[in-house]
Amino acid sequence: MARRIKQGVERGDAITIEVNGAPLAAHAGETVATALLAAGITAFRKDRAGAPRGPVCNMGVCFECLVPMALRETDDFVRRRACMTMVRPGLRVRIGEE
């Protein structure tokens, strides 16, 4: 069972990001990895063998959380570390890719 600290935690304003074309609730001040993990998404991508991969270190060292992101609607998708990228309105993320 997942356990989250909720008591005494102040979260930023609610925003919505797009993950694989669907809206996902997030909060200002969170990273993309935090928003995905809070939504119960633990597999961010697949390795070359097709095995699911997700964050290991959650501090930008391991690169296991690389996912394609477009920071604005006009941007192309570029792989970025989910644990180092802050959520923002209009952010588009694709997960489950190699």
Image: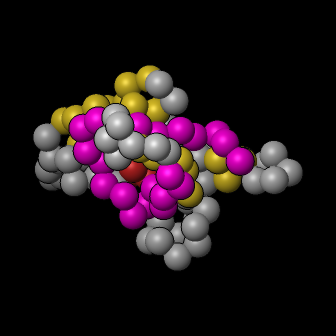
Which residue is pictured at 53% across the width and 70% down the height? Answer: 57
- Image check: 64 left or right of 35? right
Residue 72: x, y in percent?
32, 41
Question: Magenta: predominant secondary structure element?
Answer: loop
Residue situated furthest top in the rendering: 22
Q: What span is colored magenta in the figure?
A: 78-98
Q: Quadrant of residue 23?
A: top left
> What residue is at 53 percent from the left and 55 percent from the top?
79
Is residue 42 visible in the rendered image? The answer is no
In this orientation, which residue lies closer to the viewer: 41 or 81?
81
x and y percentages locating residue 13 in the rendered image:
13, 40
- Left or right side of 10 for 71: right
Between 8 and 16, the residue placed more toward the observer is 16
At x 48%, y 61%, the residue is: 81
Residue 53 image position (x, y, % from top left): 67, 53
Say above or below: 33 vs 1: below
Q: Any magenta on residue 97?
A: yes
Residue at the (81%, 53%) spot, across then down: 48
Residue 74 part of the magenta segment: no
Image height of 76 relative to 9, above or below: above
Q: How is the image coloured?
A: secondary structure
Left or right: 49 as drawn, with respect to 98: right
| Residue extending farthest bottom | 61
Q: Using the rendered image of the protein, determine whether residue 53 is visible from the camera's viewpoint.
A: yes
Q: Count the marks: how many?
A: 0
